[in-house]
Image (cartoon, rainbow, N blue to C red):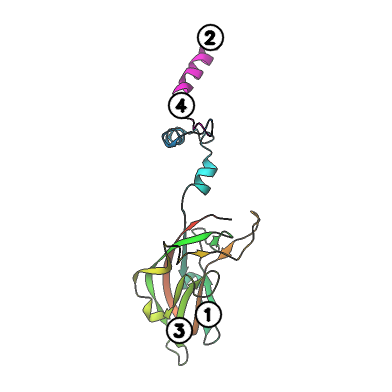
Amino acid sequence: MKLLFILCAFFMALLPAFAVVNPDPGKPGLPNKAAIKYYLNRGYGFSPQLGTEITDHKIQLAKGQWNMSTQGGASVVLPTTVLANLVDVDGKDLQIPYHAIIKKVMVDVLTAPVASGATGYDAPYMGLGINTAGDLLGYRLATGWTAGIHDGIPQGMAGSAIKVTGGTTALTQQGSTIKVNMYGGSVVGGKINVFIEYYLSD
């Protein structure tokens, strides 16, 4: 009798969670936004299909960093070379999935790049790229990477968006890395954070 009472109390406690579900007539059982919020706030992550909410129903955000003092760099006059890959918070190469559509890029220059003073290496040009060398932030003199926030090329409109063409479709494979590219010289210092908004596509 005591066990029956406990079971009844347990199911009664669950009733409010199921009561907020408002099925779409075309998609029986699909919870509405209020129900999704209710479920997630109470730990019922399975009900609103949390994976779908995270991947398909929101803009993705990636943060990458280049820090000369920890990642190093390169000295080159010609041709264009990769100075470094952006890294994520774990220090691994930042990957953007294959076929993702990059909506917006912002660059926060924390420490302005410092050009080498050596003759022939004192006028470096730097850019950010994923499909091509400067498609996320066009080439500019390192001295033009002043401290502060800079707009990248993708700025939220279809005409400036970039679809990732590198990488592979397999979930077990890597996507495309974002590279800090350079030509015409070398740098001996600098630190930037890069923020990338993107959609997952096919």
Question: Disc 3 designates what residue?
Answer: 124
Question: Disc 1 designates what residue?
Answer: 74
- Secondary structure at badge 1 equals loop
Q: Is residue 50 left or right of residue 113?
A: right
Of discs 4 and 1, which sits in the foreground? 4
Q: Residue at x 50, y 31 (%)?
A: 25
Question: Disc 4 designates what residue?
Answer: 17
Of discs 2 and 4, which sits in the foreground? 4
Amino acid type indicated by mark 3: Pro
Mark 3 packing: few (<14 Cα in 10 Å), some, or many (20+)?
many
Marks 4 and 3, how far apart at CA: 60 Å
Mark 2 packing: few (<14 Cα in 10 Å), some, or many (20+)?
few
Amino acid type indicated by mark 4: Ala
- Secondary structure at badge 3 equals strand
Q: Which mark is residue 2?
A: 2
Q: Is residue 4 magenta?
A: yes
Q: Is residue 74 left or right of residue 112?
A: right
Amino acid type indicated by mark 2: Lys
Q: Nearer the viewer, residue 10 or 69?
A: 10
